[in-house]
Amino acid sequence: MRHTDEEIEAAARRFEEWADSLDPDTAEVEDISDLRAVAEAADAARRGEARVAERVAIARGHGRSWNQIALALGISRQAARQRFAESAAASRRRSRYKADVRRLAEHATVTGVAADDEEGSRRPRS
């Protein structure tokens, strides 16, 4: 529903009158510090969880078993694997992809072949 300019101006005047009637000395403000603390704790937990997942991926990359990781986390091997296997595998895939890109770039430098152009065809470097 669209409002006319007159309706918008009338609403703005009503708001200004209401805002002017507020007295900061007598206004009742709800204390939300407990909710702010909950939000901060949740943010910290998410950051911590991301750090744990990253460390698990690094440990798996170094050849650590799910048993060893589970012991470090204080959970069962099955729980560790269920919780982190997908993110650890994704991290390994990213590492392999980066290594493949480096090898291709080195090969292109050695052979004098430029990377694929937009059409996907190879062309000699000039």
Image (cartoon, grey):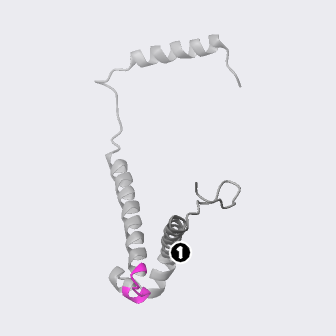
Residue at image position (37%, 49%) is 35
Q: Nearer the viewer, residue 117 or 39?
A: 117
Residue pushed farthest top? 6
Compared to residue 42, the image places residue 49 above or below, namely below
102 relative position to 30: left or right: right
Q: Position of residue 122 (x, y in %)?
A: 66, 61
Compared to residue 41, the image places residue 7 above or below, namely above
Q: Start and end of the magenta stretch? A: 61-68
Residue pushed farthest left? 25
Q: Position of residue 74 (x, y in %)?
A: 35, 82
Q: Which residue is mark 1?
A: 86
Q: Nearer the viewer, residue 12 or 14?
A: 12
Query: Is residue 62 located in the magenta-colored stretch of the structure?
Result: yes
Quick one: quadrant of the N terminus? Answer: top right
Q: Amino acid at mark 1?
A: Glu
Compared to residue 120, the image places residue 56 above or below, namely below
Q: Position of residue 15 (x, y in %)?
A: 49, 18
Q: Position of residue 98 (x, y in %)?
A: 49, 68
Residue at image position (51%, 73%) is 96
117 relative position to 29: left or right: right
Quick one: quadrant of the C terminus? Answer: bottom right
Query: Is residue 26 located in the magenta-colored stretch of the structure?
Result: no
Label 1 crowding class (10 Å Cα cut-off): few <14, some 14-19, many 20+?
Answer: few
Q: How many marks?
A: 1
Q: Nearer the viewer, residue 123 or 4?
A: 123
